[in-house]
Amino acid sequence: MIIYTLLTLMALYFLSPFVYMLFTTFKTETEAIAYPPKLFPAKWLWENYISAWKAQPFGQYFLNSVLVTVGTTAGQIISCSLVAYGFARYNFKGKNIMFMILLSTMMIPWDVTMIPQYMEFKIFGWINTLKPLIVPSWFGSAYYIFLMRQFLMGVPKDFEEAARIDGANAFQIYWRIFMPIMKPQLILVGVLNMITVWNDYLGPLIFLQDRSKFTLALGLASFKGVHSTQIIPMLCITVIMILPPIIVFLFAQKHIVEGTSGAIK
């Protein structure tokens, strides 16, 4: 009981700034900077969100962020699961060397490859489009491949042997046997990638120039530059931006921790 009480107090301590930010979005500018501060507004101004949303084309920014997030998440799940399945369930010449080379790419920060990638995408004519933010994810990520491979190596061979006896080919075994087994890992990869891409600022800043192509993170940054003296609009857009990752995590957390309990069934 004491441990749960301490954990609850710690959770409240870390959540208190976000709670105060949420209630501040319904205040006036005068109330927001008043001292001593008050948690609840004197009058709930729901129109603050409408005014902030209409100040810039945040609807288009939001749509761009959704397209990039969905596209990259689908790419990571499909490509990483395929590569991980190959490394975990097949033996071929040079397998260990190739896997070591793959893992070594994790030590190269994106800042180093940023300029070569920009030059490459400029040759392709992809600058100022969403393609540089989506297409690379369809070639996989070393971290996600490693995560899925380690899980697949612990799956008994009985699964695929039984499928081969029933006449399933390699792709059918991957799609019908291992993809359902990997459901917790796939959801974990999806959530991690979604949070990373949704909050990404540097990538869109480098590759996007037209405001109509801006993502929500980049649009929020430009919005802060224009409304640097106005606290309420910035907080409203910030709250809107952090809600989708929180909602996705709340719905996915059960699947992330469930493990492989449903695989044997």
Image: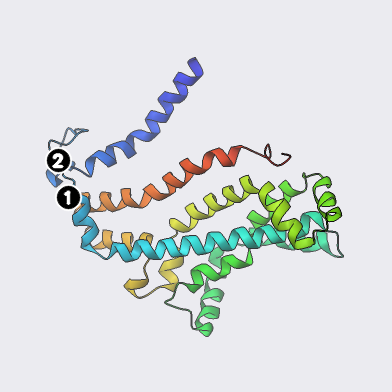
Q: Secondary structure at mark 1?
A: helix
Determine whether, in the image, residue 208 is placed left or right of residue 41: right
* Residue bearing the label numbered 2: 31
* Rendering coords of residue 244 (x, y %): 40, 50
Q: In this rendering, which labeled residue sits more in front, label 2 or label 1?
A: 1
Determine whether, in the image, residue 147 is placed left or right of residue 221: right
Mark 2 residue crowding within 10 angstroms, few (<14) / some (14–19) / many (20+)? some
- At x 56% / y 61%, what residue is drawn? 74
Q: Secondary structure at mark 2?
A: helix
- Identify whether 35 is placed above or below 118: above
Residue nearest the observer in this picture, 251 or 25: 251
Q: Amino acid at mark 1?
A: Glu
- At x 55% / y 79%, what residue is drawn? 120
- At x 81% / y 53%, what residue is drawn? 163
Measured Cα–Cα span from mark 2 to mark 1: 16 Å
Give the quarter of the image for residue 259.
Answer: top right
* Rendering coords of residue 53 (x, y %): 24, 58
Q: Amino acid at mark 2?
A: Glu
Rendered image: mark on residue 47:
1
* Rendering coords of residue 44 (x, y %): 16, 40
Determine whether, in the image, residue 174 is placed left or right of residue 118: right
Residue 109, visible in the rendered structure: no
Q: Quadrant of the C terminus?
A: top right
